[in-house]
C-alpha cells in the first residue's frame, strides 16, 4: 500500500526532470532568475510529478477494482477497509495537489512562476527545488502561518 502523502511534500519517487537535450541540468544562483532554461526545468519537474501522481492513482484504481473485500475474519476485513480508506484519502489529497501543480504551470506560462505572490520577490531556487508549487518565500510563508495561527487562537 502506498504511503500517505501530504500536499506539502513531493513524492520521493518523483523522477528528476530531464531536459530535451538529455542533460541533467539543475538551476543555479549564478544565472538569471527564471530564465527560459529554468522555466523549462521547473515545467518538466512539475509535469513529471503530475504524471507520477496520475500513474499512482491508476494503480490504486486498478487495485481497488481487482481486489474485493472477501476476508472471512471481521478483523481482517476491518483492517482492509481501513487501508482502503487511507489510500482513498491520500488520492483525494493528491487530486488537490494536481490542481496546485496545474496552477504552477499556469504561473510559468504567465511569467509569474518563482516570484512570491505576497512580496513579489524571487523565491529561492532551493525552495522551488524542494517544493515546486511554492507561491511564497520562506519568510512570507512564515508570516502567513503565524497570522493564521493567531487568528485560529482568537
Image (tube, helix red, strand yellow):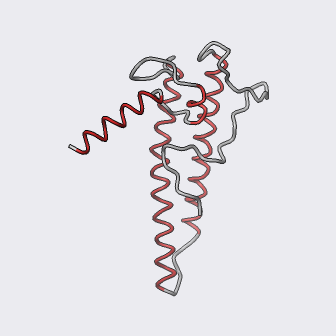
Total numbered circles: 0
Q: Position of residue 109 (x, y in %)?
A: 53, 20
Residue closer to the observer: 134 or 105 = 134
Residue at the image point whose x is 57% and y is 30% from the top = 128
Q: Residue at x 55, y 65 (%)?
A: 65
* Residue positioned most to the top: 32
Residue 148 occupies which quadrant of the picture? Answer: top left
In the rendered image, the residue lying farthest to the right is: 22
On screen, residue 101 above or below 81: above
Which residue corresponds to the image point at 50% horizontal and 41% vertical from the top-left? 98
Q: Quadrant of the N terminus?
A: bottom right
Is residue 118 left or right of 103 when viewed as pictured?
Answer: left
Q: Position of residue 141 (x, y in %)?
A: 42, 32
Q: Picture quarter containing residue 154?
A: top left
Q: Is residue 124 above or below residue 57?
A: above
Task: Farthest residue to the left: give it.
Answer: 154
- Answer with the quarter of the image where residue 38 lies: top right
Q: Position of residue 114 (x, y in %)?
A: 52, 23
In the displayed structure, would residue 59 be above or below residue 151? below
Is 107 left, or right, of 148 in this rendering?
Answer: right
Amino acid at each position: 500500500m502506498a504511503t500517505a502523502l501530504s500536499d506539502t511534500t513531493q513524492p520521493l519517487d518523483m523522477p528528476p526532470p530531464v531536459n530535451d537535450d538529455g542533460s541533467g541540468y539543475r538551476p543555479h544562483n549564478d544565472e538569471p532568475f527564471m530564465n527560459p532554461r529554468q522555466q523549462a526545468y521547473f515545467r518538466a519537474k512539475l509535469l513529471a510529478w503530475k504524471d507520477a501522481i496520475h500513474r499512482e492513482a491508476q494503480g490504486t484504481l486498478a487495485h481497488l477494482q481487482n481486489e474485493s473485500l472477501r476476508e472471512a475474519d471481521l478483523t481482517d476485513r476491518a483492517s482492509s477497509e481501513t487501508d482502503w480508506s487511507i489510500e482513498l484519502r491520500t488520492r483525494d489529497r493528491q487530486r488537490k495537489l494536481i490542481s496546485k501543480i496545474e496552477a504552477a504551470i499556469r504561473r510559468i506560462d504567465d511569467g509569474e512562476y518563482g516570484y512570491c505572490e505576497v512580496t513579489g520577490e524571487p523565491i529561492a531556487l532551493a525552495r522551488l527545488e524542494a517544493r515546486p508549487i511554492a507561491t511564497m518565500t520562506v519568510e512570507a510563508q512564515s508570516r502567513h502561518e503565524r497570522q493564521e495561527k493567531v487568528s485560529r487562537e482568537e
